[in-house]
């Protein structure tokens, strides 16, 4: 091997080490669905008993906070909360099998869109968000799981991403599309938005939110959501 070949070989080795230990390798080690979040709870959950009508609520921090702020609701009805803070439809789709299908529920309630509009994953695309929702519905139906779709809650803006100034318009458009899709496919649709929006038709009623601008419901907000959701779940089942 001449000096030129040795130099090329050394350079190749260096590039290989950089690739193995650089940002690309670290990115490849990320579980973008965060499936470990509920892995233990899922493994400890027994199979549904005969006649059990298991219900899973899939969502982001709004669903995750629901379990922590009003655990009595989940205990009373036996619902299973599978919300992960910060997640978007991109993440939901990646963990749909682990956190929904494998739990063998009779019904899944999907609340998605807030963090898509907030651009937590990437630039917002209604088409992609809606497509992810369609894919989840199709996966559920293929596994004989009933689906309830819900509106995005009212949000005038996001404290963690203040450059988003047209959230109400994007939410209104996405909600209209979800509602129309639900009707066309004979899926129940729960309109949280109309019950929780303030007089400006953009923001969440301050009395129902924990933050400003209102993104996350407080206990009173969750009680409003529960009053709307439970009758639809019972009717669907």
Image: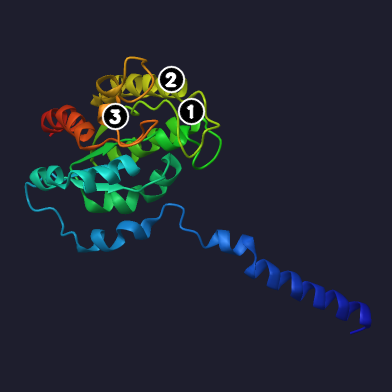
Where is residue 184? Give x, y as percent: 31, 20
Which residue matches tag 3? 150
Dot 1: few (<14), some (14–19), or many (≥20) neighbours within 10 Å? some
Tell me: residue 80, above or below residue 158. below
Q: Are marks 1 and 3 in contact (CB under 8 Å)?
A: no
Left or right relative to 36: residue 52: left
Where is residue 10? Give x, y as percent: 81, 78
Q: Residue drawn 32% across and 35% down? A: 111
Mark 2 and mark 3: Cα distance apart in space: 14 Å
Q: Residue drawn 43% across and 46% down? A: 91
Q: Looking at the image, is mark 2 or mark 1 earlier in the sequence?
A: 1
Tell me: residue 193, above or below residue 52. above
Q: Looking at the image, is mark 2 or mark 3 earlier in the sequence?
A: 3
Which secondary structure lies at badge 3? Answer: strand
Q: Are marks 2 and 3 in contact (CB under 8 Å)?
A: no
**Closer to the camera in the image, 86 or 53:** 86
Which secondary structure lies at badge 2? Answer: helix
Residue most toward the bottom? 1
Left or right relative to 60: residue 11: right
Left or right relative to 107: residue 39: right
**Closer to the camera in the image, 199 or 167:** 199
Which residue matches tag 2? 173
Q: Residue drawn 20% across and 63% down? A: 44
Q: Are marks 2 and 1 in contact (CB under 8 Å)?
A: yes
Q: Quadrant of the C terminus?
A: top left
Mark 2 and mark 1: Cα distance apart in space: 8 Å
Tell me: residue 184, above or below residue 135. above
Left or right relative to 130: residue 63: left
Q: Quadrant of the N terminus?
A: bottom right
Residue 126 badge: 1
Tell me: residue 119, above or below residue 42. above
């Amino acid at each position: 091997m001449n000096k030129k070949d040795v130099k090329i070989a050394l350079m190749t080795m260096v590039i290989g080490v950089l690739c193995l230990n650089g940002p690309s390798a670290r990115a490849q080690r990320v579980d973008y669905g965060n499936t470990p979040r509920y892995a233990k709870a899922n493994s400890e959950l027994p199979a549904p008993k005969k006649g059990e009508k298991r219900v899973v609520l899939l969502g982001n921090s709004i669903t995750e906070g629901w379990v922590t702020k009003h655990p009595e609701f989940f205990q009373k009805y036996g619902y299973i909360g599978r919300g992960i803070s910060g997640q978007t439809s991109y993440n939901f789709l990646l963990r749909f099998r682990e956190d929904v299908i494998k739990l063998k529920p009779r019904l899944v309630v999907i609340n998605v869109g807030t963090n898509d509009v907030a651009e937590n994953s990437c630039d917002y695309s209604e088409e992609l968000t809606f497509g992810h929702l369609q894919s989840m519905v199709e996966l559920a139906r293929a596994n004989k799981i009933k689906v309830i779709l819900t509106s995005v809650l009212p949000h005038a803006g996001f404290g963690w991403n203040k450059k988003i100034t047209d959230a109400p318009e994007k939410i209104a458009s996405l909600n209209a599309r979800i509602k129309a899709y639900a009707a066309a496919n004979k899926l129940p649709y729960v309109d949280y938005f109309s019950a929780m929006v303030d007089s400006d038709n953009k923001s969440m009623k301050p009395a129902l939110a924990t933050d400003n601008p209102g993104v996350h419901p407080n206990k009173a907000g969750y009680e409003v959501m529960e009053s709307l959701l439970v009758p639809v779940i019972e009717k669907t089942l």
